[in-house]
Image (cartoon, rainbow, N blue to C red):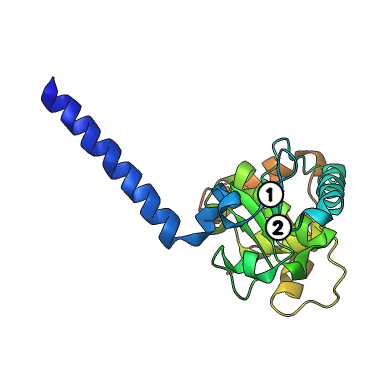
Amino acid sequence: MKRILRVVCITAVGILLLTVIAYLVYRPLRSLVPERVGMTKISDSVYIDDVSKASDAIELANDSIKELAKDVLVIERPPRMLFCYREKTFRSFGFRESAARSIGGIAVVLSPRAIYGYFLKHELIHYWQSRNLGFLCERYYPQWIIEGMAYSMSNDPRHPLNEPWETYRHQFEIWYKDVDKNHLKEELRRFSKVKMGARLPYNRSLKPSP
């Protein structure tokens, strides 16, 4: 019994140490506890580093989720939405060049350059993808689906985008015309199976990119 208890204790300590190391080394994991980098929780899912902008952030978050729901991208459990009005806060998560990032099914992080509706919706679409298509969906779907969908359905006003993003958006929009919008998740999943080699009927006007 003592031996079992000892093994359990050692295992627990090991897991704790690995968690701490991961938190320190892989800085995006700081989104799990954004208060540690000076952010304040102002609603169930919104965090901010400048409380004077609290009402703006909450309004932007709510509006973005509602707009996506109109396009059948319903987000029942929003991720942590981290509004970094200071570049220093954004960089504390380990990001440099990006303006905004989605961290799997954990959080969406916006830099001062990305606190706009289309940026937030873009990252929320990636969150929707990870929740509905799988955490590793980027491996099983072509980039013109993953990124093209995010640029298109976020109504990104920039035209044209830098390449290859503009091409991805165009390819997605061609494909999207022929799908059942009310069963988008199923349409995407079927497409993923084709990409993975399953022999399923597929009559879309656009074939997967190599």
User: Mark 1–mark 2 contact, CB under 8 Å?
Assistant: yes
Tell me the number on the disc at residue 200: none
Disc 2 residue type?
Asp
Residue 205 in view in this figure: no
Query: Circle 1 sits in a helix, a strand or a loop, which is it?
Result: strand
Quadrant for the N terminus in the image: top left
Left or right of residue 25: residue 36: right
Residue at 41% x, 62% y: name it. 25
Kindly indicate the quadrant of the structure image that contains residue 122.
Answer: bottom right
Spatial CA span between label 1 and label 2: 6 Å
In x, y percent, where is residue 48?
72, 54
**Looking at the image, is mark 1 or mark 2 earlier in the sequence?**
1
In the shown orientation, is residue 4 left or right of residue 185? left
Q: Is residue 187 left or right of residue 13?
A: right
Q: Residues within 10 Å of mark 1 (few under 14, many from 20)?
A: some
| Residue 139: image location, x then y, percent | 52, 58
Location of residue 115 by image quarter: bottom right
Q: Which quarter of the image is occupied by the C terminus?
A: bottom right
Q: Quadrant of residue 206?
A: bottom right
Q: Nearer the viewer, residue 68 or 28?
A: 28
Residue linked to disc 1:
40
Q: Secondary structure at mark 2?
A: loop
**Residue underneath mark 2:** 49
